[in-house]
Amino acid sequence: MGITDNHISGPAARETVEAARHVAVIGAGIIGAGWAAFFALRGLAVRVVDSNPGARDMLDAALARAEQVMKALGQVGERTTVPVLTDDLAWAVSGAAHVQEALPEKLDLKHEVYAGIEAASSPRCVIASSSSGIPPSVLQQGLRHPERLLIAHPCNPPYLMPLVEICGGQHTAPWALDEAEAFYQGLGKQTVRLRREITGHLVNRLQSALWREAVYLVANGYASLEDVDRTVTEGLGARWAVCGPHRIFHLSGGEEGMAGFLEKLGEPVEQWWASLGQPRLDMATRKALIDGMDQAAHGRDSVQLAQDRDDGVIAMLMAKRHGA
């Protein structure tokens, strides 16, 4: 299987990936280790920067899980590598065509590391932050070359979930956005590009909106946590895997489409919006969520729950691929 199979292929995608055979990943936490495993199993040379004692174990565990997942999806490249762990930032980014930053959401830390990246990397090296919520213009503050920094936020884990959302800041150059999008697509990812930056980007804003109401329903005793989750997986999620929320309501309008839906149900929807809850994560709410999750797990630990998630998502993605 080639590096571009099942997605964008041809000379342009191959050239983009070949030009970025060496990538640097900054941080070996859950997201960073996941990115490193994905890149390595797609055949890129990966240097990971992290000085924490447990970083090697995190990388090894992510690589083992990612290999299982990506083999099931048919996404392991013809050649694979093993991520190299180092605490030498300058060496890691020297010669890299792409840097994937996956540090904690601490702005001072990110800015400190960006200075080191800029000092040692090529001016054409894209700096892609996995930040889940910080707008890119904030990340660009103080950079000598802010034009090459952008957001490339994955869904977790990066080796399983197809989507990467890309967002430029006030100073991001068009070439950086184009190269980043081609890079991820060339590795088999689906991408969305935000037209404007906003806190939380797309994925987390949509996810947070649903979870806010889910928390409200659980905390106020309308349903158990398990039944709220089941409502999503068996009611909403089955359609969301193939239709976004706008298309679902467009189809609800019958032959008149979205116009018909808005005419018939626009006012009721506004009433639903007005009734949505505004929960707080106070101690009582946190206890309700923790206790509810313990009950919903039915004795399964986090490792088994993650395995169940991976198996389910793999089955869904394979079904979508065969049905396309």
Image: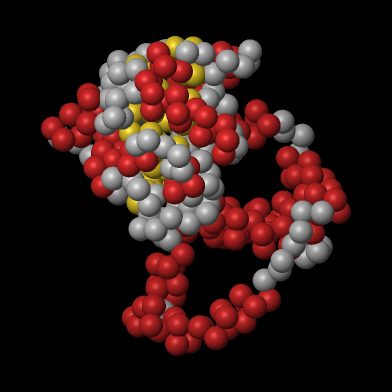
Quadrant where the N terminus sits is top left
Q: Is residue 135 above or below residue 298?
A: below
Q: Is residue 282 above or below residue 158?
A: below
Q: Residue furthest left?
A: 11
Which residue corresponds to the image point at 45% horizontal and 24% vertical from the top-left?
A: 116
In front of the other: 260 or 189: 189
Residue 223 located left or right of residue 273: right
Coloring applied to the structure: secondary structure
Which residue corresponds to the image point at 25% horizontal and 28% vertical from the top-left?
A: 17
Q: Is residue 123 above or below residue 275?
A: above
Which residue corresponds to the image point at 40% horizontal and 72% vertical from the top-left?
A: 251
Kindly tell me whether residue 25 is visible in this rendering: no
Which residue corresponds to the image point at 53% horizontal and 58% vertical from the top-left?
A: 206
Q: Residue furthest right?
A: 284
Task: Estimate the x, y position of residue 130 in percent, counting from the top left.
Answer: 47, 38
Kindly tell me whether residue 113 is visible in this rendering: yes
Residue 177 located left or right of residue 296: left
Residue 94 located left or right of residue 130: left
In front of the other: 59 or 323: 59
Task: Estimate the x, y position of residue 49 in percent, counting from the top left.
Answer: 49, 19
Task: Estimate the x, y position of residue 264 in percent, counting from the top left.
Answer: 48, 87
